[in-house]
Amino acid sequence: MCLGYILNIMKFSNHTIIVENYPQPGEHLLYSTRTQALVKINQELKHLVMNFRDMPLEMKERHQAHVNHLLQMGLVVRDEAEDKKKLQEFQNQLKHGVLKKRFPVTILTTYACNFKCVYCFQESSRDFEKMSPETAEHAISWLKSKMEQFRYDELFLIFYGGEPLLNKPILEHIAGHIQQWCRRHGFDFAFLLQTNGYLMTPEIIEKYKKIGLSHVRISVDGVGSDHDRNRPLRGGGGTFDRVMKNIADCADQIEIGISVAYDKGDITPIERLLDYFEERKVLNKLGRFICSPVHPTLGGKDTPEKVVGSSCMCNYEDKLLVETNRKIKELFEKKKVATKNGMAISVCPLTRDKAGVTIDQQGRMFKCNSMLGHPDLSTGNVRDADYNDRHREFLNLDVWRQCPQDCTYMPMCSGGCRLMSFLNNKNFKTASCKKPYLNEMAPEYIKRDYDALVAERNKKKKSA
Ligand code: SF4
Ligand code: SF4
């Protein structure tokens, strides 16, 4: 028995969330917002950690292995100083390091779009220029240099627009070239096509799968007029019927995820959309659904502080978001459809050196897609060896220092969305806190993550 263990204080980390009495009374889930570890413990172990100093020696000895395990997972720390030190190391890694071995980069091959969506973030600031072959070559060289410099395992491109299928030659050139290069250099490569679905055909999907297409994401805003009202053709006219036909034609070939934006907490359009897919026997062929409130967007070139659209997430009451999220969760569970959910580190990429890369059609780089079309918020150019001063300004905001350092959500939030701060406070520096929302939703997400883990484990046991 190591005496140090007995004498140590031991406490749950400030960044451990305890979900009590789940899955059974007397059982508790622990989740670390710093390490993302998730475990179940019993009442006795919880009681021991919470009252460690005063607990009998026999009990400490009996649980030594368990407590050490919790220590390794970052769910328990020896004292406040250790907690603080680990948080600072984490923040440093977050700011300068690479959290995952996948390098996701969004590429806009064009701002041009055949749709004229009512809440389009680019409508007031777009030009219709397409990416030139010369810019594409610079983008390719830049991607290769970053892969070699940081030795990621995988390059993951997201082709985005505008409508990326309006500049197919450049998309095909970039994906085809990068795929070959990655193969030769031992990197994995895949890409996602974020499209409005209007021009998607089985032939395009077949061709693109050969150059690395792994899945497609299409924005659909409801059924018939619900969709057409938000997402009409640029020249006028509905788009729903054709998009649905294209989805049905391609659903057997590739995973198609659906993004749905809801407005003012009304989920009726989502409900009707699920019924529509179900009636046509397409629902169980689709990939994940991502439902989000209509996104906050900057205004036109000269008035970025003017929010575009009638409603955006930053104007949502936390209560409304919570209620809406619950309704969506129930709806998707009823239909047995996968959604994007669960706990994750979602610290704003603006404040992280190597996160959040979007390259626009001129080769300018942005750390947030909602800032596209605002050259003064660009953080560099693929033609340059280094990022610019705006990048360094964002990186050094260190918003998290304003927050209470023992905030449970600090490692996964670190001061919140910088765009919301800009929209609400006209600066990027102020913390943008959604803690009441996180307090409500975190336990539900943790329970969902736990249930999914158990289901996965049971499935593996059955098939073994
Ligand atoms: S500013 Fe907000 S929307 Fe933009 S990247 Fe950061 S978290 Fe995302
Ligand atoms: S913004 Fe709020 S929830 Fe996020 S770290 Fe700061 S205090 Fe915590």
Image (spheres, rainbow, N blue to C red):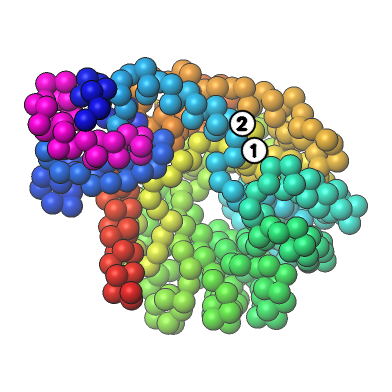
Q: Which residue occupies 10% across, 31% down?
A: 58
> Quick check: marks 2 and 1 in contact, CB under 8 Å?
yes
Residues rendered magenta in the picture: 47-75
Give the x, y percent position of residue 388.
77, 29
Give the x, y percent position of residue 172.
78, 66
Secondary structure mostly seen in the magenta stretch: helix
- Give the answer, above or below, for where 192 lies relative to 413: below
The residue wearing badge 2 is 96
Q: Is residue 146 highlighted in magenta?
A: no
**Nearer to the camera, 54 or 28:** 54
Secondary structure category for the residue under label 1:
loop
Give the x, y percent position of residue 285.
46, 77
Q: Describe residue 380's horizontal placement relative to residue 426 as left or right.
A: right
Q: Describe residue 346's horizontal placement relative to residue 42 as left or right.
A: right
Q: Which residue occupies 81% across, 62% down?
A: 177
The residue wearing badge 1 is 354
Q: Describe residue 412's horizontal placement relative to residue 108 as left or right.
A: left
